[in-house]
Image (tube, rainbow, N blue to C red):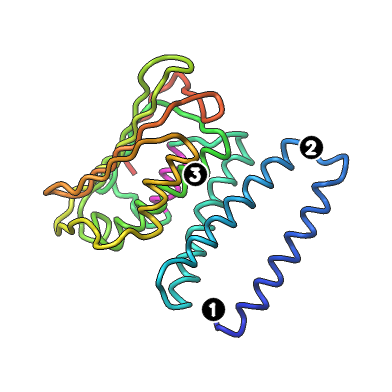
């Protein structure tokens, strides 16, 4: 995107935002729709603000920002279609975006789980950052593989979701020298939004990211089926 076009594009986005707010604030706009819109806009503002804090040139900033917004919108599209965000579909869509679809590259396995829209957007952003890191520094850029699994322990309000993203690389990269946007999403945003605990382990054969958080009603729910799929 040319530098001269950026102020124009920002002005257009602000105008669109004002028009949408006017429409949603009318009496006949469903309360749930207004709530979801405001929640999404809050997430967008967070992404824009925190992305701007990364030391990048303008083209790189715009590229990374657009990718993050696209990930958020893919999650929102699932929520709009299904009323919730299917975790398996979220993962498959994000990996497919980076052409990780061969059976010998990625494996996705876990119980059928539907996340509430806000929680699903947060998880989508975390998954996006893991996928980008895998492309730039890990398995997807080095001919390795990714095994993604999740499980739910306990019942009702006491249930805990454990999500594991495990990479096996052909070329191993160690821990990053500085914490960027992706690390902040994984170690701070997930804590704030989902009360999650995240462990990033740079093992000899690749990154292992383990995320645990309570699966309360405001976060999501587990269905009966178990999904195992290679993509």
Identify residue for label 1: 1
Region in magenta: 88-96
Name the residue at 54% across, 78% down.
1
x 46%, y 71%: residue: 61
Please, which residue is most extreme toward the left here?
204
Q: CA distance from mark 1 to mark 3?
A: 27 Å
Residue in view at x 46 percent, y 23 percent: 222
Crowd class of label 1 (few under 14; some 14 to 19; many from 20; radius 10 Å): few
Nearest the camera: 224 or 119? 119
15 is higher (above) or lower (below) than 196: below
Work out whether mark 3 precedes mark 2 in sequence or the reverse, and give the earlier one: 2
Which type of secondary structure does the marked residue at label 3 adopt?
A: helix
Q: Where residue 14 sits: x, y (%)?
A: 71, 65
Residue depicted at x 33% and y 52%: 100
Q: How far from the left and from the top, in percent, is residue 30? A: 79, 37
Mark 3 lies on residue = 122
Residue 67, placed above or below residue 35: below
Pointer 2 or 1: first along the chain: 1
Q: Are marks 3 and 2 in contact (CB under 8 Å)?
A: no
Q: Is residue 6 left or right of residue 151?
A: right
Counting residues from the N terminus, which is met first, the one under dot 1 or under dot 3?
1
């Amino acid at each position: 995107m040319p530098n001269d076009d950026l102020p124009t594009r920002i002005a257009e986005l602000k105008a669109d935002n004002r028009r949408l707010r006017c429409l949603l604030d009318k009496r006949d706009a469903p309360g749930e729709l207004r709530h979801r819109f405001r929640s999404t806009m809050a997430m967008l503002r967070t992404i824009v603000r925190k992305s701007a804090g990364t030391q990048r040139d303008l083209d790189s900033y715009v590229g990374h920002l657009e990718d993050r917004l696209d990930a958020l919108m893919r999650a929102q599209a699932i929520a709009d279609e299904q009323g919730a965000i299917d975790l398996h579909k979220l993962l498959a869509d994000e990996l497919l975006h980076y052409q990780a679809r061969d059976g010998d590259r990625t494996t996705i396995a876990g119980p059928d789980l539907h996340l509430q829209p806000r929680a699903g957007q947060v998880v989508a952003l975390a998954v996006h950052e893991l996928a980008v890191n895998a492309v730039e520094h890990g398995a997807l850029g080095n001919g390795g593989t990714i095994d993604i699994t999740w499980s739910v322990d306990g019942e009702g309000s006491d249930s805990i979701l454990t999500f594991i993203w495990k990479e096996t690389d052909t070329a191993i990269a160690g821990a990053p020298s500085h914490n960027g946007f992706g690390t902040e999403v994984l170690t701070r945003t997930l804590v704030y939004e989902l009360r999650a605990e995240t462990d990033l382990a740079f093992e000899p054969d690749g990154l292992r990211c383990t995320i645990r958080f309570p699966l309360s009603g405001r976060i999501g729910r587990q269905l009966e089926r178990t999904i195992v799929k290679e993509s």
